[in-house]
C-alpha cells in the first residue's frame, strides 16, 4: 500500500511560508529566513485534501490530505471543525493483534514535525466528520484544522465519488481544452493507498499559496530566477490557482484573495501603459471578475493566461 | 494505543504476508488458504431480497465477494468497498456481470434498515446480509475467520472493531482468496479476473 515512498519531507522553504501570508516577492531563501517577520506563527499547508462521498445511509465520513509544516518547530493539530457538521474529530485507525481494525479518537492530536509532513490517509489518521447527510454532502467540503501554535488552516477538500472518479462533468464537457494535460485523473483511485501526488487535486488551503514543490509534475522549479520585471512576483500562488481551476476547483474567496494580492503588487509597480505588466494586470482583473461571477470556465482560461504571461515576464516560482 | 507507525508496520506485515503468497507470478495477490475453508454452511437473511436466506456460494461460473463491515464506518469500510468498485469498473463488462458482492453487517442494531442502500451505493445489485440473531452472525463470521466487536462506551459512543478483509468465494462455497485492507484496486481487479478465468 506504499506506506509510503513519499513520507520524505517535502521541500518547503521559508520564503514560501512568507509568500503565503504576504504574497510579497521573495528574492532568496536566505534573505527570507533571516527576516524578522519569520518569527510570526508558521503557516501550515495541506496538499491533496479530499473526502469521499458518503454512501446512502452513511452518516460519517473522513477527510484526508498531507499537512506540511515549513516552520522550525513541531506543530500539533489539536482539533478540526467544518460547516457541514458540528461533530468533527481527529481519529486514527489502528490494527489489533488479531488483524481487526478499530478507530480511536486522538484526544492528544497529531504532530506535524518541523520541516516535515503529517499524512491523513485511508486506513490511518483521518479527520472524521460525524452526523453528515449523504444526500446533501457538498462537492467540496471545508474543514478548518486548528493547531497548538500556528494559524488555523482552512482547507477546501474535494469530494471524490465512490467509484474514485472525479470531475466527470468537467471532462465530459471539455471545459479545460487547451489546459495542461491532467489526463491521469480519469484513472484516479481516490481510495487506493498509494496516495500519489495528484497536483490537480491540490485544492490547496486558503493560507497555502506557497511552498509546494511542483517538481512532481515534471516542471522545473524556478527558484531565484526573478531576473526581470519591475515587481518580482512569486508565481507559485498563481500556478496553484491555475491548477485548481484546471481541476475544476473553484474556491472563490481564497482565489480572489490571491489575485488581489497580485493586482496590488503590480499596481504598486506602476506599469507603463501598453507594457506586458499592464497586460497581466488586465488579465488579473478579468480573472478576479470571473472568480467573483463563479465563472469557472473563464477563470480557468484566464488563470492559465496570467500564469503563462507571468512566466514570460521572467517571474518564477518561489 | 498503537501509534500510527505501529499501524503502518502491521499493514506492511500483512502485505508482506500477502505478497509472499504471490511468489509465483501467476497466483493471486491475496491470501490463499489450503485447504480452502468451506463457508456456505451458514446462511444469513438477505435484506435486499426480503430476508430470503443467502448462502455464501457463488453461482456457477461466477465469483462471490463477501465483506463484513458496518455503515457507520467512516474510513475503512468505504475505502475497501470503493476500491472494490474501482476494481470491478476495470473489468470487462461481461466479467463484472459474473461478480456478486454480499456485505454482512456486524452492527445489525443500527444497520438493518440501512444496509441495502448502503452496499448498493458501492455495487449495484449487491446483497445486504444482516440478522439480529447474534449467534447466527457469529457462526457465519467464524466460517470466514472474520472477527468483530460492537461495544457501547461509557460516553454512549458505539465502538466497533472488525477484521477488514474481502473474501472471494467459489461456486462450491469454498473460500478462494482473502484480501487484506489496502490491497490496490489494480491487484484486486487482476485477482478477480484470475478467479473468473478459473471458474469459467
Image (spheres, helix red, strand yellow):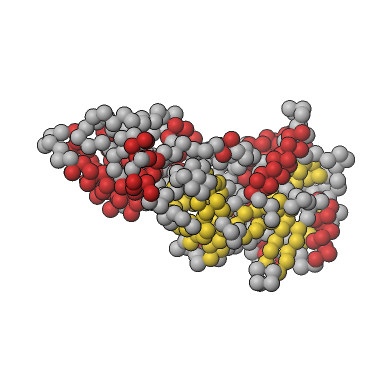
Q: Residue at x 50, y 59 (%)?
A: A80
Taking depth in this image into account, of A83 and A317 the one nearest to the observer is A317
Number of callouts: 0
Q: Is residue B153 visible?
A: yes
Q: Quadrant of residue B109?
A: bottom right
- For the N terminus of chain A, give its image quadrant: top right
Is residue A193 left or right of A70 when viewed as pictured? right
Residue A125: x %, y % from top left: 59, 51
Is residue A207 left or right of B134 when viewed as pictured? left
Q: Residue at x 65, y 72 (%)?
A: B155
Taking depth in this image into account, of A182 and A314 the one nearest to the observer is A314
- For the C terminus of chain A, give its image quadrant: top left
Q: Quadrant of residue A30?
A: top left
Residue lying farthest to the right in this orientation:
B35
Q: Residue at x 23, y 43 (%)?
A: A265
Residue B186: x %, y % from top left: 63, 36
Is residue A68 left or right of B35 when viewed as pictured? left
Q: Is residue A177 visible?
A: no
Q: Residue at x 60, y 38 (%)?
A: A4
Residue A61: x %, y % from top left: 56, 57
Q: Is residue B161 above or below residue A215?
A: below
Taking depth in this image into account, of A196 and B91 the one nearest to the observer is A196
Residue A71: x %, y % from top left: 45, 45
Amino acid at each position: 500500500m506504499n506506506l509510503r515512498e513519499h513520507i520524505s519531507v517535502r521541500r518547503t522553504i521559508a520564503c514560501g511560508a512568507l509568500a503565503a501570508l504576504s504574497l510579497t516577492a521573495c528574492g532568496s531563501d536566505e534573505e527570507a529566513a533571516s527576516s524578522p517577520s519569520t518569527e510570526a506563527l508558521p503557516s501550515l499547508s495541506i496538499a491533496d485534501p479530499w473526502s469521499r462521498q458518503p454512501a446512502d445511509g452513511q452518516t460519517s465520513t473522513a477527510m484526508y490530505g498531507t499537512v506540511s509544516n515549513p516552520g522550525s518547530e513541531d506543530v500539533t493539530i489539536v482539533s478540526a471543525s467544518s460547516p457541514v457538521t458540528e461533530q468533527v474529530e481527529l481519529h486514527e485507525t489502528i490494527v489489533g493483534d488479531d488483524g481487526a481494525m478499530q478507530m480511536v479518537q486522538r484526544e492528544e492530536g497529531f504532530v506535524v514535525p518541523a520541516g516535515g509532513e503529517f499524512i491523513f490517509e485511508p486506513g490511518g489518521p483521518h479527520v472524521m466528520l460525524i452526523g453528515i447527510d449523504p444526500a446533501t454532502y457538498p462537492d467540496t467540503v471545508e474543514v478548518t484544522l486548528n493547531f497548538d501554535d500556528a494559524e488555523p488552516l482552512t482547507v477546501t477538500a474535494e469530494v471524490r465519488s465512490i467509484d474514485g472518479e472525479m470531475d466527470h462533468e468537467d471532462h465530459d464537457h471539455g471545459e479545460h481544452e487547451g489546459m495542461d494535460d491532467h489526463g491521469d485523473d480519469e484513472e484516479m483511485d481516490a481510495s487506493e493507498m498509494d496516495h500519489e501526488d495528484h497536483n490537480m487535486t491540490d485544492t490547496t488551503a486558503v493560507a497555502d499559496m506557497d511552498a509546494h514543490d511542483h517538481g512532481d509534475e515534471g516542471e522545473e522549479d524556478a527558484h531565484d530566477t526573478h531576473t526581470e520585471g519591475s515587481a518580482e512576483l512569486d508565481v507559485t500562488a498563481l500556478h496553484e490557482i491555475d491548477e485548481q481551476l484546471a481541476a475544476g476547483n473553484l474556491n472563490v474567496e481564497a482565489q480572489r484573495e490571491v489575485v488581489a494580492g497580485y493586482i496590488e503588487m503590480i499596481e504598486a509597480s506602476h506599469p507603463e501603459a501598453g507594457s506586458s505588466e499592464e497586460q497581466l494586470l488586465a488579465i488579473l482583473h478579468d480573472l478576479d471578475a470571473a472568480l467573483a461571477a463563479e465563472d469557472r470556465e473563464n477563470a480557468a482560461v484566464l488563470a492559465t493566461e496570467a500564469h503563462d504571461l507571468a512566466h514570460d515576464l521572467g517571474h518564477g516560482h518561489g | 494505543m498503537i501509534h500510527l507507525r505501529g499501524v503502518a508496520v502491521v499493514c506492511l506485515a500483512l502485505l508482506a504476508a500477502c505478497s509472499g503468497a504471490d511468489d509465483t507470478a501467476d497466483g493471486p495477490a491475496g491470501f490463499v488458504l489450503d485447504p480452502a475453508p468451506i463457508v456456505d454452511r451458514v446462511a444469513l437473511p438477505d435484506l435486499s431480497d426480503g430476508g430470503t436466506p443467502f448462502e455464501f456460494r457463488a453461482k456457477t461460473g461466477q465469483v462471490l465477494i463477501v465483506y463484513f463491515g458496518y455503515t457507520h464506518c467512516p474510513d475503512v469500510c468505504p475505502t475497501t468497498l470503493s476500491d472494490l468498485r474501482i476494481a470491478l469498473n476495470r473489468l470487462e463488462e461481461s466479467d463484472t456481470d459474473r461478480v456478486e458482492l454480499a456485505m454482512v453487517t456486524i452492527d445489525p442494531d443500527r444497520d438493518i434498515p440501512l444496509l441495502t442502500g448502503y452496499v448498493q451505493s458501492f455495487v449495484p445489485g449487491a446483497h445486504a446480509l444482516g440478522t439480529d440473531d447474534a449467534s447466527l452472525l457469529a457462526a457465519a463470521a467464524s466460517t470466514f475467520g472474520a472477527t468483530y466487536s460492537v461495544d457501547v462506551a461509557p460516553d454512549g459512543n458505539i465502538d466497533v472493531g472488525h477484521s477488514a478483509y474481502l473474501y472471494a468465494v467459489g461456486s462450491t462455497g469454498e473460500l478462494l482468496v482473502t484480501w487484506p485492507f489496502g490491497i490496490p484496486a489494480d491487484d484486486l481487479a487482476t485477482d478477480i479476473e484470475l478467479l473468473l478465468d478459473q471458474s469459467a
